[in-house]
Image (cartoon, rainbow, N blue to C red):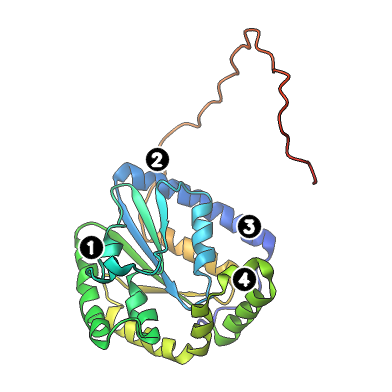
Amino acid sequence: MSKKSSKKLSRKKYEKELYKLQAELCLLQEWVVAKGLRVIVLFEGRDAAGKGGAIKRIMERTSPRIFRVNALPTPNERQKTQLYLQRYIERFPAAGEVILFDRSWYNRANVEPVMGFCTKKQYESFLMNVPSFENYLIKDGIILIKYWFEVSMEEQTRRFKNRINDPRKHWKLSPMDLESHYRWYDYSRTKDRMFKATDTPWAPWNVINGNDKKKARLNCISHLLSQIPYKKLPGKKPQLPPRQKSKGYKTPDYPYKWVPEKY
């Protein structure tokens, strides 16, 4: 785990920095469209390490037509018979798109072997072949960025307990999350093996210290912006046109069903 200062970031400072980074994401978005770039960003890591929060902040001010999130469900019976990577490839970007994978094909390197959802042969085959697959993507012009969110045992436990005690967060605590808490060291071993096999010069893992959620989000977005060279495109601010003349229009006396104003 990173030894960076544990000094807390104030809410005011966090909001100020997030605003600047989200504004830059919008400039990047324009560049991606103008240049027809294809971008894939993978978000992997420990459960409750902050992947979802980082993705949410990236998506908050960007267009969902350009920045798209994929969190694939459990494969159906047909998909189980397909080539493993097939259902991910069909979600890949076209020109002018950024695809964010909230967990990705690396399920086969972490969740599946720990939970017994794949065979040892499938696991070993994946680790051996995925570096070549990612090299092919990059050679074809796709920008591939991989993030691993790490969190300490103590902080993960605290967040899980918070989810248990907060009714707004019950949906965020699945049986798989509970199992991941129990199987901490099993996941540690698969993570270590995954890094050794797939942390390549052409597709390296970028590790985010997730112990402080605010800092993790800012660090992730800042790093993402640094990975894609872009410039602010020339253009003028749009001018708001005046309202058209009413030409006698009057609001009708219609019995609208107004929502009660309880607040």
Tag 2 and tag 4, C-beta contact below 8 Å: no
Q: Amino acid at mark 4?
A: His
Q: Earlier in the sequence, mark 4 or mark 3?
A: 3
Q: Which residue is mark 4?
A: 170
State the mark number for residue 233. 2
Is label 2 or label 4 in front? 4
Q: Nearer the viewer, residue 246 or 219?
A: 246
Q: Give the Cα separation between the discs numbered 2 and 3.
A: 25 Å
Q: Earlier in the sequence, mark 1 or mark 4?
A: 1
- Secondary structure at badge 3 equals helix
Q: Which residue is mark 3?
A: 15
Q: Position of residue 160 (x, y in %)?
A: 60, 79
Residue closest to the far right = 262
- Secondary structure at badge 4 equals helix
Residue closest to the far front = 77
- Secondary structure at badge 1 equals helix
Q: Give the Cα separation between the discs numbered 4 and 3.
A: 27 Å
Q: Amino acid at mark 3?
A: Glu
Q: Is residue 140 above or below residue 215?
A: above
Crowd tier of the residue under label 1, counting other residues whose Cα lies within 10 Å: few below 14, some 14–19, many 20 or above: some
